[in-house]
Amino acid sequence: MSRFTVAIDGPAAAGKGTISKAVAAHFGFAHLDTGLLYRAVGAKVLAGSDPVQAAKALTPEDLEGELRTPEVAQAASRVAVLPDVRAALFEFQRSFAARDGGAVLDGRDIGTVICPDADVKLFVTASPEIRAERRYLELSNKGIEVTQKDVLADVIARDKRDSERAEAPLKPAEDAVIIDTSELSIADAVANAVAAIAACR
Ligand code: CDP
């Protein structure tokens, strides 16, 4: 089977991960959560490493462990503004996208920078309040103690840093299909994404 790339971008906690996993399972494609790469670099920096060295030396083991905490999310978005960090992670993402059998990559710059040639580009979004509410439930269910107010502030701060940076800012590609999940159930959001991808196959 040949290559087929699906790029899924969007702001923090918009549902990219859930949608990406579901469409990858539906079509039998491999999935890469590129946010995890930045989170792993952010975690290394919190532990005292230099960000660029950490990005260059990243190993699969670094992607294991608890990276989905608010502290690591903020550290990720701080290292993500650094062009040398982004450059160090570029080739791995490009070759993942080019693998045979189809690939789904989700992040912030997949449709704009990593895979401007993707077969399908989706931009998944929702209102900040709804995204914060979903992330609050996700973190609380994991036993991570947070307040709804802090989660909203975290989401807004990250979106601002991610959108305003000079290198690979968060923005929809011109040819992206926008899916606003504010009023959608998970099943409906996934169905919309599957339909958009199926239309391009
Ligand atoms: O899951 P959530 O949407 O909260 O965040 P994530 O996808 O795990 O990404 C964490 C951070 O990594 C983001 O806030 C971005 O600063 C950065 N990131 C990026 O710059 N480019 C990507 N392709 C993916 C993530």
Image: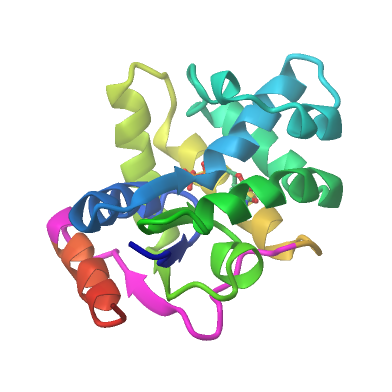
Q: Position of residue 75 (x, y in %)?
A: 68, 33
Residue at image x 77%, y 27%?
Answer: 54
Depicted 45 relative to depicted 90: above or below = above
Q: Is residue 188 magenta?
A: no
Majority secondary structure of magenta residues: loop
Q: Is residue 173 magenta?
A: yes
Residue 81 seen in the figure: no
Depicted 61 relative to depicted 117: above or below = above
Which quarter of the rendering shows the N terminus?
Answer: bottom left
Residue 190 seen in the figure: yes
Residue at image x 40%, y 37%?
Answer: 148
Q: Please give left or right for residue 101 compared with residue 153 in the image.
A: left
Q: Position of residue 63 (x, y in %)?
A: 54, 26
Residue at image x 75%, y 34%?
Answer: 55
Using the image as rendered, state which of residue 61 and residue 174 is in the foreground: 61
Which quarter of the rendering shows the C terminus?
Answer: bottom left
Q: Position of residue 135 (x, y in %)?
A: 38, 40
Magenta-tinted stretch = 168-187
Q: Please give left or right for residue 26 compared with residue 128 in the image.
A: left
Number of callouts in the render? 0
Give the residue furthest to the front.
1
Q: Please give left or right for residue 45 compared with residue 13 in the image.
A: right
Residue at image x 22%, y 63%?
Answer: 189
Q: Please give left or right for residue 18 compared with residue 153 in the image.
A: left
Q: How is the image coloured?
A: rainbow
Q: Quadrant of residue 26?
A: bottom left
Depicted 58 relative to depicted 14: above or below = above
Depicted 70 relative to depicted 172: above or below = above
Using the image as rendered, state which of residue 174 and residue 7 is in the foreground: 7
